[in-house]
Amino acid sequence: MFLIPTVYCDGIEDPFAIKQLFSDLSSFEIRTQIKEAYSGVSGIYMFQCIVTGGMYIGSSINLYDRFCDHVMGISSNLHLQNAANKYGWDFFNKLLRLVYPLI
């Protein structure tokens, strides 16, 4: 798996630490896990193609709803959608970086 290299400084905590990593995004089980964990949760997310290493970074006030928008091709980023159409969602990872409950 290809991930973005992170540079660490002594005494500084990574402000963008990965909170959770999901792979095989075409799996019903994985989609259910994302729904249970991230409905109504805001945060920063990243999709990464494991074939090319290409990345899409976004943020949302409801991570699960935005995930569904991307996977179903509803108001998704055109470049991300084209890559997903070419390689399939099972060749993408979804990383959740900063996650905050809605206030």
Image: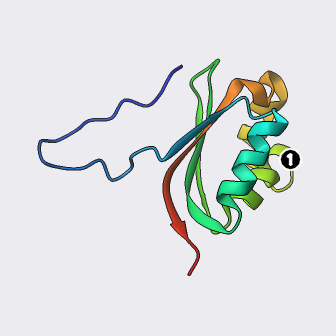
Residue sitting at 24 percent across and 50 percent down? 13
Residue sitting at 74 percent across and 39 percent down? 30
Please tell me which residue lies in front, 28 or 73: 28
Residue sitting at 26 percent across and 35 percent down? 7
Bin the neighbour count of mark 1 within 10 Å (Cα to Cα): few under 14, some 14-19, many 20 and up. Answer: some
Q: Name which quarter of the figure residue 92 lies in.
A: top right
Q: Name which quarter of the figure residue 38 lies in.
A: bottom right
Query: Label 1 sits on what residue type?
Result: Gly
Please tell me which residue lies in front, 36 or 101: 36
Residue 71: x %, y % from top left: 81, 44
**Residue identified by numbered label 1:** 73
From the viewer's perspective, is residue 98 above or below residue 46?
below
Quadrant (top left/top right/bottom left/bottom right) for the N terminus: top right
Q: State the SS at label 1.
A: loop
Q: Name which quarter of the figure residue 53 lies in.
A: top right
Please tell me which residue lies in front, 33 or 100: 33
Q: Is residue 61 left or right of residue 85?
A: left
Residue 25: x %, y % from top left: 75, 35
From the viewer's perspective, is residue 84 above or below residue 43?
above
Q: Is residue 55 left or right of residue 89?
A: left
Quadrant (top left/top right/bottom left/bottom right) for the C terminus: bottom right
Residue 17: x %, y % from top left: 39, 46
